[in-house]
Amino acid sequence: MADCIFCKIAKKQISSDIVYEDKKILAFLDNRPASLGHTLVVPKTHAETLDKLDEDSLKSLILSVQKVSKAISKFSQGYNVIQNNKEVAGQIVHHIHFHVVPRNDGDGIRWNRPNPVFSEKEIKNVIEKIKSNLNL
Ligand code: 5GP
Ligand code: ZN
């Protein structure tokens, strides 16, 4: 996509700190990292969200996320893998990407979330909604 920042990074029109690259995938450091080594893994072809990505690209993408995670696990105590879809979920760059965030004791990172309570009826309904939309 013409004015997509991650397409431009993937095409090397904008520079980035690349840590891994193959035919389909680029992994580079986030320029506003949550921790040292915070890496973004992106397909070179544009898709906005996970649900829009073709299967082949998704396979390459998730395997690359694991590759980067294996590397990060060698020098950090743990790591988070995060993937946001749509602005309401925190997606700022509209080109699918996984965050791999190295974690260590005392790093101060907090992913706070509310814990709402739902009725049995609501839970039953949402199970049905998910199941009935699985093969669409
Ligand atoms: P999102 O909130 O969309 O899941 O995360 C987008 C991430 O991309 C953010 O953490 C942000 O710091 C990072 N980012 C945005 N623009 C650039 C850029 O031009 N270069 C790099 N390396 N990272 C970027
Ligand atoms: Zn793009």
Image: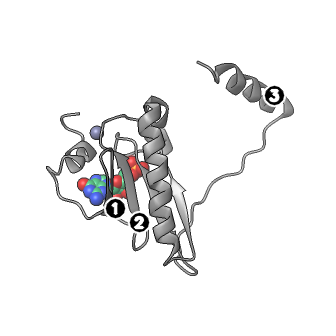
**Whether the residue under disc 2 has CB within 8 Å of ligand 1:** yes
Q: Is residue 58 left or right of residue 122?
A: left
Q: Residue at point 62% right, 54% down? A: 113
First in sequence, mark 3 or 1: give its number: 1
Q: Between tags 2 and 3, which lies in front?
A: 2
Q: Residue at point 24% right, 46% down? A: 5
**Which quadrant holds residue 46?**
top left
Q: CA distance from mark 3 to mark 1?
A: 39 Å
* Residue, disc 3: 124
* Residue, disc 2: 38
**Whether the residue under disc 1 has CB within 8 Å of ligand 1:** yes
Q: Secondary structure at mark 3?
A: helix
| Kind of residue sitting beneath label 1 | Asp
Residue 86 at least partly seen: no
Q: CA distance from mark 2 to mark 1?
A: 6 Å
Q: Position of residue 12 (x, y in %)?
A: 17, 51
* Residue, disc 1: 30
First in sequence, mark 2 or 3: give its number: 2
